Image (cartoon, grey):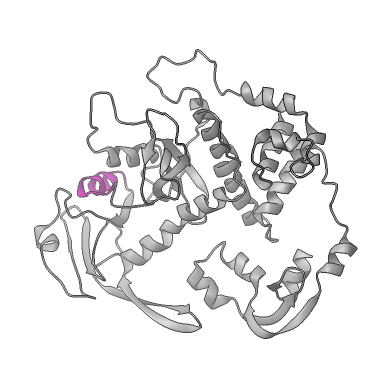
């Protein structure tokens, strides 16, 4: 079975029009590595009968009974939605216009700021009785179940947030920060209705400790927070943009929200690289491919780079796993002397930031912070066509 998984990962790295083309006689498409690991008919047979529960299991009410036992929750930081692309017929197929894949199966995910997914829920549609009340709040409470009373901060957007949910989380010693819709119940009218000028900020705190903050940028931004350090004051931060230092003035809660929300975006971005998703698969197989070889693989990669001082790019990480799974080394691997001869270290006329140092810094910092920390150098690798300091050049080659 590990060889089967290894082939799926190879298919994420090397794309062809159809699965059968990996074993085609035409050398334009044929993949010798996959052919050496497993025969085509054997692979297709495993794929056809690849299930995740007993076929007759389930009482008809659990729409996810085919994969239910494999969804294991964890800890939380950020909550948002992700999409597994699917345009076929499915009762709970969703449409989200601002996603790269607009149609598909919606996932509610909990991630850390560095892209590690701790927990997720697959959305299976509305309940049979009709519209579900407080769906956003129920989703958040379900995701953080068994994680309350630990002083964590939940970062969510205006789809979930309300004063009622903020108060409910405070009872569980869990804090909230995020954007807010102006039509939510229980909002202070003096904040929502008041008109303010660009750059101004106003706010109010309720008796139960819920802060509602309104800030005018190009348009009004309404925030909700129960964090004690968030208030209706403008904070100033600097960033480097196009070689110039810029001052940014925003309320502190907006800085916290923007910095934290990058976690899920980074997780989705890394999952999309070398994707194993193929057309023609049934929805539950496609969903499990995303969970195993998308989300779980990114989790393993994030943990590996945290535990090891030497940063490993995701492509190399996937290739290493493939070799472990299949037991077949890559035939065309070049020896160290060949690699060294191609990658020559020289000095460029221009100065740029070291690519290796920047990648390392981005594991723990925002892009703004990494831009400040990483120095500009003239060292350049002719083989990679990248600016590298001598330390990073020796590590990579």
Is-magenta flag for residue 144?
Answer: no
The residue sitting at 71% across, 53% down in the picture is 316
Residue 214, picture quadrant:
bottom left
Residue beneath the point at 29% across and 48% down: 159
Query: In this image, 79 relative to 137: left or right?
Result: right
| Residue 384 image point, x, y percent | 73, 68
> Residue 352 lies in what quarter of the image?
bottom right
Decide if residue 182 is in sight here.
yes
Vertical placement of residue 340 versus 345, above or below: above
Q: Is residue 66 above or below residue 247?
A: above
- Residue 354, x across and y down, in percent: 65, 74
Nearest the viewer among 89 and 397 is 89
Considering the whole magenta stretch, tell me its main secondary structure.
Answer: helix
Total numbered circles: 0
Q: Where are the magenta residues, as a range?
A: 160-172
Q: Nearer the viewer, residue 321 or 234?
A: 321
Residue occupying image coordinates x 56% and y 31%: 280
């Amino acid at each position: 079975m590990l060889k089967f998984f290894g082939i799926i990962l190879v298919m994420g790295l090397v794309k062809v029009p159809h699965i059968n083309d990996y074993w085609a006689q035409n050398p334009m498409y044929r993949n010798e590595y996959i052919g050496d690991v497993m025969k085509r008919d054997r692979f297709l047979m495993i794929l056809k009968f690849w299930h995740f529960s007993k076929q007759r299991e389930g009482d008809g009410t659990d729409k996810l009974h085919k994969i239910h036992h494999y969804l294991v929750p964890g800890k939380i930081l950020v909550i948002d939605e992700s999409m597994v692309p699917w345009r076929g017929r499915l009762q709970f197929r969703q449409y989200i216009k601002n996603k790269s894949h607009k149609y598909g199966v919606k996932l509610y995910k909990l991630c850390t700021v560095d892209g590690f997914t701790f927990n997720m829920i697959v959305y299976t549609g509305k309940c049979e009785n009709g519209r579900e009340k407080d769906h956003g709040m129920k989703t958040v409470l379900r995701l953080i179940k068994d994680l309350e009373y630990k002083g964590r901060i939940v970062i969510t957007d205006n789809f979930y947030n309300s004063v009622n949910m903020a108060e409910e989380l405070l009872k569980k010693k869990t804090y909230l920060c995020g954007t807010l819709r102006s039509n939510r119940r229980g909002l202070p009218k003096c904040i929502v209705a008041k008109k303010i000028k660009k750059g101004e900020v106003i706010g109010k705190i309720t008796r139960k400790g819920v802060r509602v903050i309104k800030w005018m940028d190009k348009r009004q931004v309404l925030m909700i927070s129960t964090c004690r350090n968030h208030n209706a004051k403008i904070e100033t931060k600097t960033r480097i943009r196009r070689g110039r230092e810029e001052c940014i003035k925003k309320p502190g809660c907006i800085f916290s929200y923007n910095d934290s929300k990058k976690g899920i975006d980074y997780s989705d971005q890394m999952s999309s690289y070398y994707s194993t998703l193929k057309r023609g698969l049934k929805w539950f197989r496609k969903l499990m491919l995303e969970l195993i070889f998308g989300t779980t693989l990114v989790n393993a990669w994030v943990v590996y780079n945290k535990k090891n001082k030497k940063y490993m790019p995701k492509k190399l990480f996937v290739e290493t796993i493939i070799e472990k799974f299949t037991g077949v080394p890559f035939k065309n691997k070049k020896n160290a002397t060949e690699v060294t001869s191609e990658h020559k270290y020289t000095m460029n006329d221009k100065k740029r930031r070291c690519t290796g140092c920047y990648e390392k810094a981005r594991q723990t910092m925002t892009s703004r912070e990494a831009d400040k920390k990483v120095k500009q150098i003239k060292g350049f690798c002719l083989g990679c066509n990248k600016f590298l300091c001598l330390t990073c050049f020796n590590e990579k080659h």
